[in-house]
Amino acid sequence: MTDREEIGVPELGEPISHYTDAVRAGDLLFVSGVVPTDAAGNVVGGDDVAAQARRVFENIRLVLERAGTGFAHVVKVTVYLTDVNDRTLINPVRQEFFGVTRPASTLIEISRLAIPGAKLEIDAVALVP
């Protein structure tokens, strides 16, 4: 396939494994799971899941912008939470970033994430106009 592009975002730091921040395939962008870390890999937000969510969405914005798209073009998200009861705390943050756009969504509670201290991880699929 000649219409495949790997997209790395230096501001997010180096991935912890053999993957890239996103892959564009045609006019679809597949964003890898994004956690609430800074470029050095430190968890941002401490124990505050809303603060962690804000960082996750800020990091997703960096990936979307690097690929030439934005939240209005996100068609699907998958949210992984270590406590499903935190859904009500992250929803207002999610609405700040998506505005009136409502992507398809899946929410999954998991026992832990690869980054110690992270309470959520989100991946996404977006259209690239």
Image (tube, helix red, strand yellow):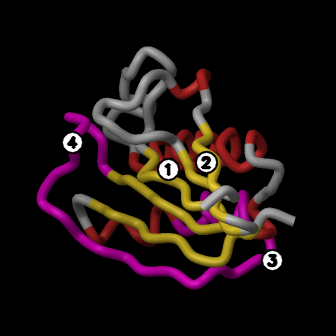
Q: Earlier in the sequence, mark 3 or mark 2?
A: 2
Which SS class for mark 2?
helix
Residue placed furthest toward the right: 129
Front tag of 4 and 1: 4
User: Residue 60 bears which disc, if any?
Assistant: 2
Q: Earlier in the sequence, mark 3 or mark 1?
A: 1
Q: Earlier in the sequence, mark 4 or mark 1?
A: 1
> Residue at the spot x=38%, y=22% of the render?
41
Front tag of 4 and 3: 4
Q: Is residue 129 left or right of residue 88?
A: right
> Residue at the spot x=41%, y=70% of the render?
87
Q: Position of residue 60 (x, y in %)?
A: 61, 48
Q: Position of residue 11 (x, y in %)?
A: 61, 23
**Amino acid type of the residue tagged 4 in the rendering:** Ala
Q: How far apart are marks 3 and 1 (CA)?
A: 18 Å
Q: In the rendered view, would you say 37 is above or below 53?
A: above
Q: Is residue 24 left or right of residue 81?
A: right
Q: Distance between the residues labelled 1 and 2?
A: 10 Å
Residue bearing the label numbered 3: 100
User: Residue 114 bears which disc, if any?
Assistant: 4
Highlighted magenta segment, given as a residue range: 91-119
Which SS class for mark 1?
helix
Across the whole image, how many numbered discs are drawn on residues? Answer: 4
Q: Which of 72 and 19 is in front in this view?
A: 19
**Amino acid type of the residue tagged 2 in the rendering:** Ile
Which SS class for mark 4?
loop
Q: Which of 103 and 97 is in front in this view?
A: 103
Q: Nearer the viewer, residue 113 or 87?
A: 113
Task: Look at the image and tell me in which quarter the N terminus lies.
Answer: bottom right
**Amino acid type of the residue tagged 3 in the rendering:** Val
